[in-house]
Image (cartoon, rainbow, N blue to C red):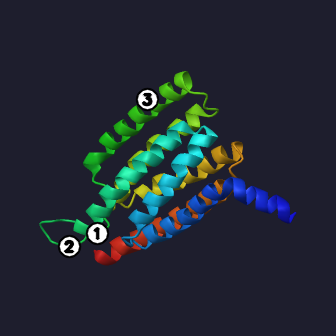
Amino acid sequence: MTDSIIFWLSVNYIELIGAILGFVYIFLSIRQHIFTWPVGLITSALYVYVFLVSKFYADMLLQVYYVVVSIYGWYHWLKGNPKAEQQLKVSRTPRKLYLPLLGVSLTLFLLFLFGLKYYTDSPVPFGDSLTTALSIVATWMLARKYLEHWLIWIFVDFFSAFLYGFKGLWPTVILFLVYTVMAALGYRSWKNDLKNAG
């Protein structure tokens, strides 16, 4: 039994470290802590490898995007509104962004679906494309501290847990089920902050 555990850890240690850092990342983002971004950057870098090996190609590209957006989010949370010289505060997504965000999500989904279906051996092109497109939009919304990004994450995290179970990525399944619960808690926490600020 011990030998089996040691063998599993030796094969899956990168995924395990990524999952542990993922817990830290989501906890920090709920608390609106600036270390959300450097921890997210490291987590994403590890998952680039995990998803490449597992043939989740769109998710792998998503992790590359996360690395880049982590730098953007880190800067934006620190600088906030330069005119007001204060850190960024939680706000609702402006209505004028609803249609553009929907359009970006749909466009990304279709692009990823086409690429995965015809140019890779992805076992789950539809699911991988859907979660990747929505995650790109939700992460940008997080960088802007828009409350509703949590609602997207609740869906994406729950759906992703099933996809990763299909490929036997069990630490990642657990991570994404916990993400689902924590996204719900994050929504409640940020909503309370927004109420208190008003």
Name the residue at the left extreme: 83
* Quarter of image, res 175: bottom right
Amino acid carrying mark 3 in the image: Leu
Q: Is residue 100 above or below residue 197?
A: above
Amino acid carrying mark 2 in the image: Gln
Identify the element where label 2 is drawn: loop
Q: Is residue 115 among what the camera can see?
A: yes
Residue 11, image x and y in percent?
70, 53
Q: Is residue 88 among what the camera can see?
A: no
C-alpha distance separating marks 3 and 2:
38 Å
CB contact under 8 Å: marks 2 and 1: yes
Dot label at residue 86 = 2
Q: Quadrant of the C terminus?
A: bottom left
Return the disc, 1 or 3, that comes first in the chain's sequence: 1
Residue 50, image x and y in percent?
59, 48
Amino acid carrying mark 1 in the image: Lys
Q: Please report the residue visible at 55 percent of the width from the left and 47 percent of the height from the top.
A: 49
Identify the element where label 1 is drawn: loop
Name the residue at the top extreme: 118
The residue labelled by disc 3 is 111
Identify the element where label 3 is drawn: helix
Residue 17, image x and y in percent?
59, 62
Badge 1: how crowded within 10 Å, few (<14), some, or many (20+)? some
Q: Please report the residue visible at 40 percent of the width from the left and 74 percent of the height from the top.
A: 192
Q: Nearer the viewer, mark 1 or mark 3?
A: 3
Number of numbered discs present? 3
The residue labelled by disc 1 is 89
Q: Is residue 34 above or below residue 167?
A: below
